[in-house]
Amino acid sequence: MKPVKQPNGKYKYNFMYQGKRYRKQGIATKKEAEAMIRRIVNDVAHGVEVDSNVLLADYFEQWYTVNKENIVSDKSLKRFGSTLKKIKAYFPDNFRLKDLDRRQYQEFLNHYAEGLTKDSVRKIHNPIHACMEDAAYHGLIRKNPAWKATIHGAVPAKQEKDKYIELNEYIAFKQRLMGNYTKSALLLFILHCTGARFSEINKLRRDNFNVDNNTVHLEGTKTENADRVISIAPSEMAYIMNVLDKWETGDAEHFLDISYNAAEKVFKHIRDDMGISENKTMYVLRHTHCSYLLANDVSINYIKERLGHANIRITMEYYGHLLKDRYEKDDRMATQLMEAILQ
């Protein structure tokens, strides 16, 4: 298994190991050739397919097509496609999956971090990390090169104040939507009522609404936990049914099915007319929905279920800061309860 020096001064190896022959020539140094041999022996011992020449971009595309297509929302699928474009733009066309190491992967993330927020870089990293886990499980690579990668961004994240609107604005916004019978206005109204995601609302059918108990079945587009049934106010249900009656919508028909830009255009029109900051997007309705419930002592676990988060850690990550004010109230209540024991 020792490398052999060639007449031109470079090195090669040619050896049999566990029933397979491995050969390569034109290696610059003896040290580099020895490192290659050690890697082959090590990879074979750990069940890695050393001869696999699958390309990094091809494997990622195959992975997300098989595992995510027709499962996640169109928006999420586009994000996977965008990540694929970044992989193709950064790495050479012939770059193999098995050649990616942690240093190269970190440099890849650092390259795109220069023009993105930390959250945007994380959205690039997360699917690649999952894809590399899959590759390691199938023996195409020994270790996940995305493991414990450092996520950072050069562009400041949106400030917390830009994720919410004031309560009086939240109430007034809902009133502005009522009486506007366009699809975009109804989508925003349902977003206001439910705190659901755009993609979940956009695919609703009339038979997703149960007028007998004022519930909405949100089939979900992001995770398994996103499929849920939530309650809305009777007055909200009555308004939605009134609009659908005007449209003469069938039970199984997707009565919205509009573009994100169409809904955002109506949101911006009302936002600007109300004098709300232009930094705020229509997702302030989802975030403010949550903060309003938290401010009125609705439990974080209920909110996790209502918003369709996969686990409570995600809910805490997004909204945990809102619990700080409630902590003081709970702290006083806890001490009062303990004091009552002695009375």
Image (tube, helix red, strand yellow):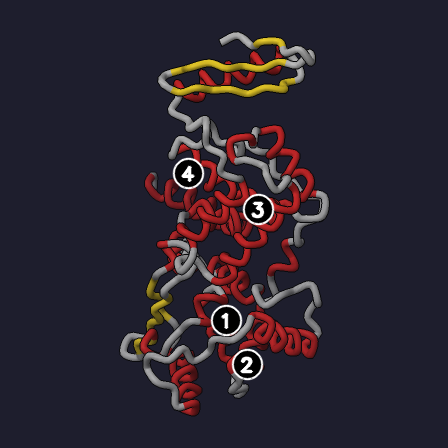
Q: In this view, does 75 lie to the left or right of 27?
A: left
As drawn, 208 above or below 75: below
| Marked residue nearer the N-terminal end (1 or 2) | 2
Disc 2 and disc 3 in contact, CB within 8 angstroms: no
Label 4: state its secondary structure: helix
| Marked residue nearer the N-terminal end (1 or 3) | 3
Disc 4 and disc 2 in contact, CB within 8 angstroms: no
Disc 1 and disc 2 in contact, CB within 8 angstroms: yes
* Alpha carbon separation for disc pair 4 and 2: 46 Å
Residue at point 54% right, 52% down? 322
* Alpha carbon separation for disc pair 1 and 4: 38 Å
**Circle number at residue 134:** 4
Can you tell which quarter of the image residue 265 is in? bottom right
Residue at point 65% right, 64% down? 280
Q: Is residue 119 visible?
A: yes
Q: How far across and down, in percent of the image, does residue 63 sit?
A: 44, 46
Q: Which amino acid does label 4 sit on?
A: Asp
Q: Name the residue under label 1.
A: 192
**Circle number at residue 305:** none
Pointer 1: residues within 10 angstroms few (<14), some, or many (20+)?
Answer: many
Observer-side mark, 4 or 2, equals 4
Pointer 4: residues within 10 angstroms few (<14), some, or many (20+)?
Answer: some
| Marked residue nearer the N-terminal end (1 or 4) | 4
* Alpha carbon separation for disc pair 2 and 3: 35 Å
Observer-side mark, 2 or 3, equals 3
| Marked residue nearer the N-terminal end (4 or 3) | 3
Q: What residue type is labelled 2?
A: Leu
* Alpha carbon separation for disc pair 4 and 3: 16 Å
Q: Can residue 303 be seen in this view?
A: no
Q: Name the residue under label 3.
A: 124
**Circle number at residue 177:** 2
